[in-house]
């Protein structure tokens, strides 16, 4: 199986969820033998079902932020992974701001990994590196797969020093909350994404985690502007979108 990235939901704030503009199901990274569920917001379990992703086959749950749109369905995913605790299996990864949100993890999971910036961990066939952010309650992640390095910024303000941690990324997933010219503390906007991609120069960038103002501006148009200024291929994620890497150096398939 080729490496696949599925965006179950792309909402970045509860206002977007309340208006039903986007869902917040999170991101699933599938490798040849394993599946990693990233940031399961409200509706994650339902959206996984629609995408025909079995949580019984999920290897690890990774929560990078305590915000509800990135952690709200954490307990539901663990319940599904473990058949309501009948099978003690799966790995939970997060820091001390996110792990207390998961009520049942102590009894039902095979392993718990506490994350902090700079920590390198291996789970089955994937090595991961925890990346710093400019937020006290969020962590970035880098996944070292056979098809390339996939980096996820999570929630962060822009800082030039962060680009050094993103160097070498083949694919970047950026939480771009607001459009060009609109700043929100703790989040990236289009201008920040441009600065990051000019520095890092990945082969592909994918925008997600959209706030209401970004949706009003239209993520597709913002992605085109970022691509124009950086010469990096940029995709604005949609709910349910799957990216297949076959491997990335040869081709990608977007559904």
Image: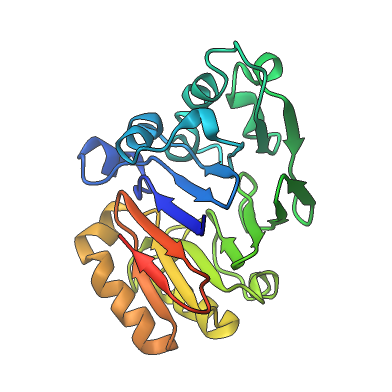
Going by the image, does 105 lie left or right of 244? Answer: right
**Residue at left 79%, top 53%?**
120
Which x, y percent locates residue 24?
37, 41
> In the visual, does 149 lie left or right of 174?
right
Quadrant containing the C terminus is bottom left
Q: Quadrant of residue 238?
A: bottom left
* Image x and y of residue 61, in percent: 59, 36
Q: Quadrant of residue 153?
A: bottom right
Image position, residue 77 (x, y; %): 49, 27
The residue depicted at 69 percent of the width and 58 percent of the height is 131
Examine the rendering and report whether any part of residue 120 can be seen. yes
> Count the marks: how many?
0
Q: Going by the image, does 190 lie left or right of 58?
A: left
Picture coordinates of residue 14, whole percent (x, y): 34, 39
Please state which of residues 110 and 44 is positioned toward the viewer in this rendering.
110
Looking at the image, the residue that sits furthest to the front is: 1
Q: Nearer the viewer, residue 10 or 145?
A: 145
| Residue appearing at x 59%, y 12% in the figure | 85
User: Residue 169 or 125: which is nearer the viewer?
Assistant: 125
In this view, 71 is above or below 190: above
For image coordinates 66% across by 76% down, the residue present is 168
């Amino acid at each position: 199986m080729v490496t696949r990235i599925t965006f179950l939901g792309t909402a970045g704030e509860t206002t977007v969820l309340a208006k039903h503009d986007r869902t917040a199901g999170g991101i699933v990274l599938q490798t040849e033998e394993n599946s990693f569920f990233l940031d399961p917001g409200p509706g994650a379990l339902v959206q996984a079902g629609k995408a025909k992703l079995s949580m019984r086959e999920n290897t690890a749950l990774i929560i990078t932020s305590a915000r509800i749109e990135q952690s709200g369905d954490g307990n539901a995913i663990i319940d599904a992974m473990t058949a309501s605790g009948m099978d003690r299996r799966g790995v939970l990864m997060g820091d001390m701001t996110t792990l207390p949100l998961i009520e049942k993890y102590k009894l039902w999971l095979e392993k718990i990994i506490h994350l902090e910036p700079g920590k390198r961990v291996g789970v089955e066939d994937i090595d991961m590196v925890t990346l710093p952010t400019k937020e006290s309650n969020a962590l970035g992640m880098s996944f070292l797969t056979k098809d390339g390095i996939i980096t996820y910024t999570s929630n962060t303000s822009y800082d030039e020093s962060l680009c050094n941690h993103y160097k070498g990324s083949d694919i970047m997933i950026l939480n771009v909350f607001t459009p060009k010219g609109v700043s929100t503390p703790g989040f990236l906007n289009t201008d920040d994404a441009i600065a990051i991609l000019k520095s890092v120069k990945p082969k592909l960038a994918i925008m997600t985690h959209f706030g209401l103002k970004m949706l009003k501006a239209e993520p597709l148009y913002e992605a085109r502007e970022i691509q124009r200024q950086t010469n990096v291929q940029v995709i604005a994620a949609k709910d349910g979108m799957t990216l297949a890497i076959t491997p990335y150096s040869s081709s990608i398939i977007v559904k």
